[in-house]
Image: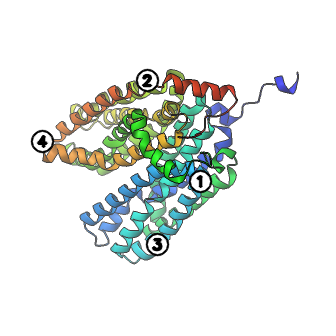
Amino acid sequence: MSEATTPQRRGIADILGIPRPLLFGFVGLLLFMVGDGVEAGYLDTFMLHHGHTQGDVNLLFTTYGITVMISAWFAGPLSDLYGPKKVMWIGLVLWAILEVGFLGLGLGPNNYTLSLTFYTLRGFAYPLFAYGFLVWIAAATPASMLGSAAGWFWFSFSAGLPTLGSQFARYAIPEIGELATFWCSLGLVIIGGLVALLFTHEPTGSKRLLPEHVNTKDIFFGSISIMWREPKTVVAGIVRTIDTSSEYAFLAIMPAFFVDHLHFTQGQWLNLLSIVFLSNILFNLASGMIADTLGHRFVVAVFGCVGGFISIPLFYYVPTWYPGNFLMAALVGAFYGATVAAFVPLSGLMPQVCPKEKAAALSILGLGAGASTWVGPAVVGLCESVFGFGLEGVIWTFAVIYLSAGAMTMVITISPEARRYTEEAVARGETVTAVGH
């Protein structure tokens, strides 16, 4: 049998649905996000225990969320301009420098002004690394693998932040103390970043994604103008905002519901939260793989949006129907986590909707992901202060929002022109990289 006709051996990465040239990128992303997530479970209580008010902590997280949102959008056009790998280097270096300032000049000496300054600026760092890699995935992965590749991205992202990062802190704090554990996060981020950037040699990510004749102004303007040139990107951005908005809202309102109203112990609530996130992590991966078979839009609309419409009320009602029954609460919590994960195929769908402007399209999804950090709590505030809803009203508001997202998702179709462009690129043996605005 000739070499040309010999079937290519499938490695473990191919079997798992990971683009083989990007394998170390996924490993590095996981380690990076573990480091970034170390603080997630105790930064707020650390500051409260060191004399800061809840208002101080809220301001810190709010300004951080704003810079995360802005940076998530910038990751797309910067990747078009400099290449995703350089953008990831920028994110890694920024994170390391600003973390040293945050810990050494702010948190360590208990200087709130410098803590606020460095932490807010550090919000620009991790999205450049993480979403820069997402653009790299979209630019270098065949369309037939985009769903599973997106699933592995969000698996690595969510497994690190907040799940494994918080678990690392849980075991490290009793051994070395809280402040030293913060410093460990710096080491984890650096190791993860170097693994991703030094061991990933896929060539697409190392070069500018757009031709040289496209100037910088057009690249950044294109990442904004795509919203009215391709209105489907706006719809996708809204759907992506809805996706995790309930998570951020529930982190604020559900602890009191389970602990104070249902009389779960604090440990039971934390275990329940871990089950929700574990389910979310596993189904991040599964939904991407399923989408490659059933279709990206179908999985988002049915399993994500309609599923959320069902799972959100169940997460509220089932524990009240079965008071004190942790197993029943865990089952509906796992179901809720799975429905949130079913939005993952959006990251595989958008590069197919806009195959010539993948980075720009993904930047809108990044903007939506960042926006969800404040939209969820804002919905809660609006329901309670303006409409006078109690918790039950808030739950049904989110359920209806998720159902409306299902209708919006059906609008996100792949045009015949986009499909033809993708098919022609595949026929030429290319992945569908961005080629111009």
- Indicate whether 302 appears above or below 32: above
The disc label shown at residue 298, or none = 2
Residue 270, given in percent of the width and then of the height, sits at 35, 48
Mark 2 vs mark 1, foreground winner is 1
For badge 4, the amino acid type reads Phe
Tell me the element at label 4.
loop
Residue 268 showing in the rendered view: no
For badge 3, the amino acid type reads Gly
Give the distance between the C-alpha atoms of the residues marked 3 and 4, in whole angstroms. Answer: 43 Å
Give the distance between the C-alpha atoms of the residues marked 1 and 3, in whole angstroms. Answer: 27 Å
Q: Which of marks 1 and 3 is nearer the N terminus?
A: 1
For badge 2, the amino acid type reads Phe
Q: Do the residues labelled 2 and 1 touch (CB within 8 Å)?
A: no
Give the distance between the C-alpha atoms of the residues marked 3 and 2, in whole angstroms. Answer: 46 Å
Q: Which of marks 1 and 4 is nearer the N terminus?
A: 1
The disc label shown at residue 101, or none = 3
Query: Would you identify the image quadrant in which residue 191 lies?
Result: bottom right
Residue located 39% across and 36% down the image: 340
Query: Would you identify the image quadrant in which residue 135 lies?
Result: top right
- Indicate whether 136 appears above or below 12: below
Q: How many marks?
A: 4
Q: Earlier in the sequence, mark 3 or mark 4?
A: 3
Q: Earlier in the sequence, mark 2 or mark 4?
A: 2
Residue 177, given in percent of the width and then of the height, sits at 45, 68
Is 209 situated left or right of 328 in this image? right
For badge 1, the amino acid type reads Tyr
The disc label shown at residue 432, or none = none
What's the coloring here?
rainbow
On the image, numbered disc 4 is attached to which residue? Answer: 387
